[in-house]
Image (spheres, rainbow, N blue to C red):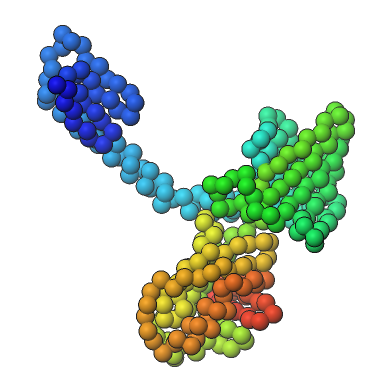
Amino acid sequence: MSQYIRIYEFLYFYSTKEVVVTGIKLYFSSNTLWNMKFTNTLLLALTIFLTLNLAVGQDSERNSEMINTSFYLDKFQRNITIFASGQDNPWSLEIGSNNSMKLLIAPDTEIIASLYKKEKNQNNQTTTYFATFKDGHIQFEMSEEACQEYPYSNNFQSSATLHFHDTNQSNYQLLRGCAEWVPNYRLHEIWMLHEINNQLFDKENLYKNIPRIEFHLNNFKVYGFSGCNEFEGEFELNHDILRIKKIHITTQEKCELDDFERQFITGLQHQSYSFKIRQGVLKMNNNKNSFVFRRTD
């Protein structure tokens, strides 16, 4: 009768004298004396190996925010305003604040082009960018329609279509993918409330602490404290426009700041704000409300 012991992904079969480790079988010769001490040592070593790999995986998850935000930081520091890419015939595109356009198409095409015109179509909410290079031209379309190319990613928020014309080689390619505005990396901070609707926040009426808000660019989540309760939600970025979606209150404290909390949360959620960051100050404005936050040191 075949018996086995399962330790994580390890299967030890007494009858067949084999150990299976994530699909790899380790066989023992039939004329080899089966030493249980050796077997136990082997299983212990494999257990430690798997545990260490699990720990590395958990560290990778914890470091994912740093990896994702470093992606934005690199582009932000290089003054890239739009990034796009596609999977079919892999390609990527960067548009810089100096009206430059860099296009990479697998396996070895690299084009540096100059942007000369931009058109906004209000009907279908599409912006088209026109650029030229030595041997042709590029037409890049960025739609506000949600991108479907990367369903597993929260980063890409717009659909992209690229028309590549190399007139010298009679080469035309129609490429599709996803695009996004490269967010202002400086938004990825914890911000303390300083003013609301041109009124300084009265710190003497605090229940616990100064209201704050923090934006996470790795997953486009927003977290904060209203002065009474903690909250969280999601946000979107479109160049210098920030839209905060529905906010969920995550604690249930009762305090004298209920009216202020209601004003604070209502003023943030389901609202679009133009924003500017300068010298550690975040200013958010629309036609109804204005907020001024200061970066924590």
Q: Is residue 231 above or below residue 175?
A: below
Query: Picture quarter containing residue 166?
Result: top right
In this view, the residue in front, 60 or 36, is: 36
The quadrant in which residue 281 appears is bottom right
Horizontal and vertical percent position of residue 242: 63, 67
Q: Residue at x 85, y 53 (%)?
A: 117
Q: Is residue 52 above or below residue 266?
A: above
- Going by the image, does 7 lie left or right of 61? left
Mark count: 0
Q: Quadrant of the N terminus?
A: top left
Residue 28 on image: x %, y % = 21, 15
Task: Please report the residue visible at 53 percent of the width from the left and 69 percent of the height from the top.
Answer: 246
The percent coordinates of residue 158 (x first, y second) are: 67, 53
Residue 229 position, x and y percent, is 41, 77
**Above or below: residue 108 compared with residue 63:** above
Outermost residue on the front side: it is 1
Residue 295 visible here: no
User: Could you tell me if residue 290 is visible in this image?
Assistant: yes
